[in-house]
Image: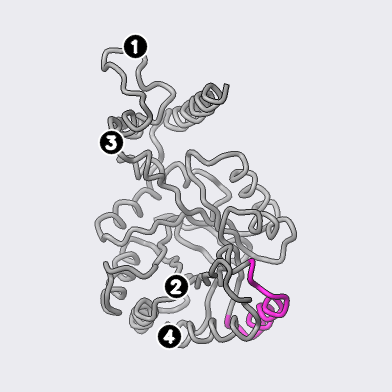
Amino acid sequence: MRYRPFGASGKAVSAVSLVLTETTAAPTPQAWRGVLFGAMECGINCFELVSGSETLARGVSEALQAVDRGLLFLTWRIRGEAGGGALDAGALGQTVRQALALTSARYFDLVMFDEAALQSLTPDAEALLGDLKSAGLVVHSGIRGDGPATDEAVRRGGFDALASPFSLISDGRTRRRVKDAAEADMAVIAYDAIPAELCRPVQQQQKAAGLLRRAAEPLAGVGTYNFLHDTRGWLPEELCLGYALTEPAFATVQIDTLTPAAVERLAAVAERDLPTGVVAQIEMARFGAREAAQAQRA
């Protein structure tokens, strides 16, 4: 595993990090404890815990009984509800303190607000974040999303970190958001780096797009993402993750799989260099996709 600085905090985080959210794959605290230990054995020290699961929180608590808290970077993500009530200082304070009690974490390195939570955050709640930092309960605050509210929050400042979707098919708006956040000295986290539609077998992609070609057609596949399935020694998911890891703005790139073998395989991508020519193939494919979209609109 390779490690990168988390903004100007001085703390190093694993280049690949893991999102932990409620799932039937880990139905008990002991199962979550095993997930964390398995990831740590792969060199992962950065975890994002999604609010709403007491079972997950208690699993983290069990893991922290055997691990030095200072070795881990823990994020607590607060989820809002579309059309839900305001997230005021009282609700925020209660949420953070309950999460700290359940996880036994003592403090969170980062409290992250998704876009719905960000939009419901009241001025007194934003002020409380400063108090929580002063009390040592929270080190950083951040925002997660790709909508107008997130873009506006990056522009006006006030948060320490941004989590944005980013992949080899990300558009210019996403890339500008990442650039703007980095230039504003925000630590930047990438998620959704592995587009599921590109990792399906090539024939399925071609049928879905109505582009099934004869195998003997000259230059078939050039300017497409077919190379993801043809690069020796690499799986499509690994190439997608490897590409995101080449972006220097990112402190870490998140994955959300919990299968031990998949975590181990994807964590190992941080130590690998992309094969020669893959970045050029990605740019050709992106250009080809733009041309196809323009032709359809014409």
Circle 3 packing at 10 Å, graded few (<14), some (14-19), many (20+), is few
Q: Is residue 46 above or below residue 212?
A: below
Label 3, secondary structure: give it: loop
Label 2, secondary structure: give it: helix
Q: Give the CA distance from mark 3 to mark 4.
A: 42 Å
What's the amino acid at mark 3?
Pro
Q: Position of residue 173 (x, y in %)?
A: 62, 43
Horizontal side of 177 relative to 54 (left or right) equals right
What's the amino acid at mark 1?
Pro
Tell me whether circle 3 and circle 4 mark residues in contact (CB < 8 Å).
no
Circle 2 packing at 10 Å, graded few (<14), some (14-19), many (20+), is few
Circle 4 packing at 10 Å, graded few (<14), some (14-19), many (20+), is some
Residue named by callout 3: 201
Tell me whether circle 2 and circle 3 mark residues in contact (CB < 8 Å).
no
Q: Position of residue 158 (x, y in %)?
A: 71, 66
Q: Give the CA distance from mark 4 to mark 1.
A: 60 Å
Q: Where, quadrant-wise, is the C terminus in this rendering?
A: top right
Q: Give the CA distance from mark 1 to mark 3.
A: 21 Å
What's the amino acid at mark 2?
Leu
Q: Which circle, 3 or 4, is nearer the viewer?
A: 3
Q: Which residues are magenta?
A: 119-137
The picture quadrant where one finds residue 230 is top left
Q: Where, quadrant-wise, is the N terminus in this rendering?
A: bottom left
Residue at 51%, 63% in the rendered image: 12
Residue named by callout 2: 71
Q: Is residue 82 above or below residue 243?
A: below
Q: Give the CA distance from mark 2 to mark 3.
A: 39 Å
Between discs 3 and 4, the one toward the N terminus: 4
